[in-house]
Amino acid sequence: AFSSLGSRVPGYLGNREAYEYVKEQFEKIGLQDVTVEEFKTTVPIDKGASLQLIKFGEEISLYGLWPNHVQVPSLPKGGVTGRLIYGGKGSFKELSGKPVDGSIVLMDFDCGQNYLNPRMLGAQAIVFYDNGRVTQGQAKGKFLQVPVDVPRLWIKKPDGDRLLRLIGTEDLEVTVTSNMDWEEVP
């Protein structure tokens, strides 16, 4: 039941739905005198992100990754526009000869911390996709304990697979937007 709710971080709908589910289960088994203690906490709230395929006039949903320390993966209002390139696992060898500066880089999720390489070479944002090797260890490697400004986003597997096919056949100009803010929530 919980895994179907999406994010259960306070401030997200899944958190409220998880609370309602637990409350309902407590009532079903007859627990009485159940109390709720509420307090405020500050969390990063993803207010939406997208990748627009300019040539096709199509918009694909993206999802902001957890902040690097306090640095959220937000982009300037209106987003950033650049060529979408495939960065693979982000090694300098794979990036060699590619127009990385000013680009948006689609990367394999199991790249370790090599996602920092395209950013060092001038990439504007990193978009991760599920290449079939998503693990908890790989996920932990995507979050730095320092406030490094590396806009990191996630795209669902079918959309990532489609972008890979398109990158292989033509130059793709895209606009990426991302808005995440810290908010105090119950």
Image (cartoon, grey):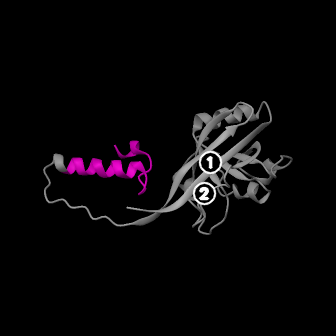
Identified by mark 2, the residue type is Lys
Residue closest to the far bottom: 146
Q: Which residues are magenta?
A: 1-26
List the residue tagged with mark 1.
Answer: 109
Q: Is residue 139 above or below residue 53?
A: below
**In this image, 180 relative to 173: left or right?**
left
Residue found at x 79% / y 48%: 94
List the residue tagged with mark 2.
Answer: 142
Disc 2 and disc 1: Cα gap in Å? 9 Å
**In this image, 181 relative to 83: left or right?**
left
Q: Is residue 130 above or below residue 32?
A: above
In this view, the residue in front, 178 or 133, is 178
**In this image, 126 relative to 43: left or right?**
right
Mark 2 falls on what kind of element?
Answer: loop
Residue 64 spot, x, y in % from top left:
58, 51
In this view, the residue in front, 39 or 159, is 39
Residue closest to the far front: 77
Q: Please identify the quarter of the rendering in which residue 108 is found.
A: top right
Identified by mark 1, the residue type is Phe
Quadrant of the snapshot with the N terminus: top left
